């Protein structure tokens, strides 16, 4: 069993544990990750993990909440601005920045959203994704338009984490920097969602 190092040597164990837990949740899945595994990878005892986080669910909440909070903020900003092209473009740019900054978090709650729908932090993420879908795809949107939304969101999240899961660079072509990825993602997501017409946001979603 790992022996915890002196506090002076590792001053921020909570943050270290969150970083390890996030990588484990993203690669192994929440159900496939135990607190003991997180402790072993981080080099702490399980009792130390439980000292900082009361449960695995509490640890999941800690690692996902910042991304979900930011997701909600940029979505609220877009909905409050209305349906102008400028507001839509600003949202897409902020959304891509979110994907790049929180790529593992987004991958985790998108890929495991159904299996973890009863976990409060994931339920909150699912609700935010649903609000975004309703804003992008108006009532009565075609199956094709709804698929475009799913491919734009899920595809971007998957691609950004493919290196972590499979290694070797995206499609074997090497790993691009965020500076290269950002404009490409903005362009591609805009292109995928462009067939959906602009619309007035329903009052109930504001």
Image: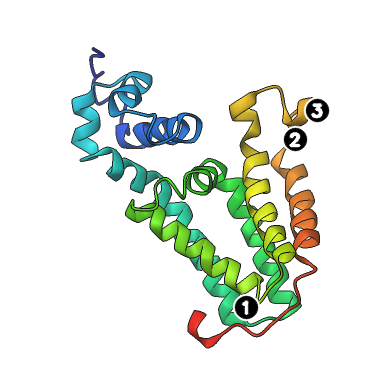
Q: Residues within 10 Å of mark 1 (few under 14, many from 20)?
A: few
| Relative image position of residue 128 (x, y in whole percent) | 49, 64
Residue at (23% x, 12% y) in the render:
1
Residue at (57% x, 67% y) in the render:
132
Q: Residues within 10 Å of mark 2 (few under 14, many from 20)?
A: few
- Residue 176 disc label: 2
- Which residue is denoted by mark 3 in the rendering? 173
| Relative image position of residue 56 (x, y in whole percent) | 29, 38
- Contact? badges 3 and 2 (CB < 8 Å): no
Residue 206 visible to the viewer: no
Pick the residue in front: 124 or 77: 124
Q: Is residue 159 left or right of residue 9?
A: right
Judged by depth in the image, the label closer to the viewer, 2 or 1, is 1
Give how far apart the Cα atoms at labels 1 and 3 are: 40 Å
Q: Quadrant of residue 103?
A: top right
Q: Quadrant of residue 48?
A: top left
Q: Is residue 60 above or below residue 130?
A: above
| Relative image position of residue 61 (x, y in whole percent) | 34, 48
Pick the residue in front: 189 or 154: 154
Residue at (65% x, 85% y) in the render:
200
């Amino acid at each position: 069993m790992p022996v915890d190092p002196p506090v002076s040597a590792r001053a921020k164990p909570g943050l270290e544990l969150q970083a390890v837990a996030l990588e484990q949740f993203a690669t192994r899945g929440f159900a496939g990750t135990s607190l003991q595994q997180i402790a072993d990878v981080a080099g702490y005892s399980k009792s130390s993990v439980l000292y900082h986080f009361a449960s695995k669910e509490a640890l999941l909440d800690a690692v996902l909440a910042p991304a979900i909070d930011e997701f909600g903020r940029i979505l609220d900003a877009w909905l409050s601005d209305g349906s102008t092209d400028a507001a839509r473009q600003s949202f897409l740019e902020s959304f891509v920045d979110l994907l790049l900054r929180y790529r593992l978090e987004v991958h985790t709650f998108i890929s495991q959203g159904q299996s973890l729908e009863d976990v409060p932090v994931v339920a909150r993420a699912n609700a935010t994704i649903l609000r975004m879908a309703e804003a992008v795809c108006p009532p009565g949107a075609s199956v094709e338009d709804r698929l475009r939304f799913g491919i734009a969101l899920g595809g971007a999240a998957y691609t950004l984490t493919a290196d972590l899961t499979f290694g070797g660079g995206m499609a074997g072509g090497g790993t691009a920097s965020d500076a290269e990825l950002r404009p490409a993602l903005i362009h591609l997501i805009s292109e995928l969602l462009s067939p959906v017409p602009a619309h007035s946001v329903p009052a109930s979603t504001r």
